[in-house]
Image (cartoon, helix red, strand yellow):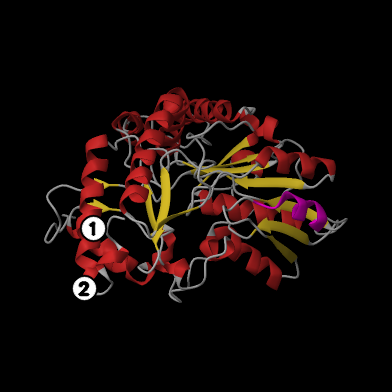
Amino acid sequence: MSVNRKNMPESIIYLDNAATTRIDERVMKSMIPYLSEVYGNASSLHSIGTQAKEVLENSRTIIANSLGSDASNVYFTSSGTESNNWALKGIAYANRNKGRHIIVSSIEHDCVINTCKWLADEGFFITYLPVDSNGIIDTEALRQAINPKTILVSVMHANNEIGTIEPIGEIGTICKKHQVYFHSDACQSFGKIPLDVDKAGIDLLTINAHKIYGPKGIGALYIRKGVNIVPLLHGGGQEGGLRSSTENLSSIVGFALAAKLCINEFRNEAERLYLLRKKIENFLFSTYENAYINGHPDQRLPGHLSFSFHGLEGETIRLLLLLDEMGIAVSAGSACSLNDQSHNASHVLQAIGLNPFEARGAIRVSMGRFTTENEVDIFMDSLRQALFSLTSIYSEYSVMNR
């Protein structure tokens, strides 16, 4: 199918890496043989199948090493969403005789929030923990919320909308003390900042490939040995009998290489992305007196920036469209918000204290491996032009230099 490029700029500056990333060419090349040559089913006993099985287990080991885990604790899934659903539902139904209380943060991804709503309808009790104005979970509230019927705490490692990094090590210590399972959604943080499941005291961890320059449609759930969980899918007994479905071998190979590349390169990349982020921050604060940052100013993902303009929140979509016309791809909050037919304000931004109007007005810029400093310069100039074009609605003072 050909791409309709009508009305599209000749070149796109992509600054929406928190939504998805461009697949690395090294990753793409690694996948090709497992689509056309080593194409066997890893459950088959013949030589082609056993070859596929060997590749599968080698990839599992690479993913496990990137987490500080044993390979036997990594289970491949189709996505981060599936992994999160499996973690919450699997723990809930396996441990409901012990209790039906689950604790999550108020800024979790929609797939966690909506799974909790479904579990509430099934008779489970959900506590949503508050966060401060920077998006940091209230650990004292966590301590107070845990009770003898609590079976699971789920707090994401880094937030997809505002980039704030949570104190998962402290959370893990609290959960271990109370003998409560701890799950963390690390789709945004995996491969970008240090992560060790043992050091953090994590029992279940969600990751995926398409946020780290790998293919879409592949994820994994780390499950610590001894965790009591039931399958979400039933069938032929693949993945140790816990996740039936024929493994997506080519994507798993791509996932493994993407993870390996990120772990090998992330220190230099994190520093580079941090400097690019600070450049945009300095531009915003030195140019616009009504600019403000959403999320923690420092405890955030290196290449992630969420910001808004006081008085212009209602014009965010128009601003994004103007930038798109200029060839700049950024987003308003989560990429999944486009599928929200109710057009609700961001639950994340409301949780950090913004009102419903303000919570519709965030701009998310997320840089990645292929982002250049020149592209950031072009973005800042384009943003200046786009904001200037909105002065017919708002006073020029509101968007101009102090």
Q: Is residue 360 left or right of residue 321?
A: right
| Residue under the point 40% across and 59% down | 308
Can residue 122 be spotted in the picture?
Answer: yes
Q: Position of residue 367 (x, y in %)?
A: 35, 42
Can residue 257 be spotted in the picture?
Answer: no
Mark seen at residue 392: 2
Q: Where is residue 233 in the image (x, y as percent from the top left)?
A: 60, 54
> Which residue is the extreme one toward the front?
402
| Residue under the point 69% across and 53% down | 90
Query: Which amino acid type corresponds to the residue marked 2 in the rendered image?
Result: Ser
Look at the picture and state if 126 lies above or below 13. below
- Across the whole image, how many numbered discs are drawn on residues? 2
Query: Which amino acid type corresponds to the residue marked 1 in the rendered image?
Result: Leu
Query: How many C-alpha atoms fall within 10 Å of the one at disc 2: few (<14), some, or many (≥20)?
Result: few
Query: What is the magenta range?
Result: 137-145
Residue 141 forms part of the magenta stretch: yes
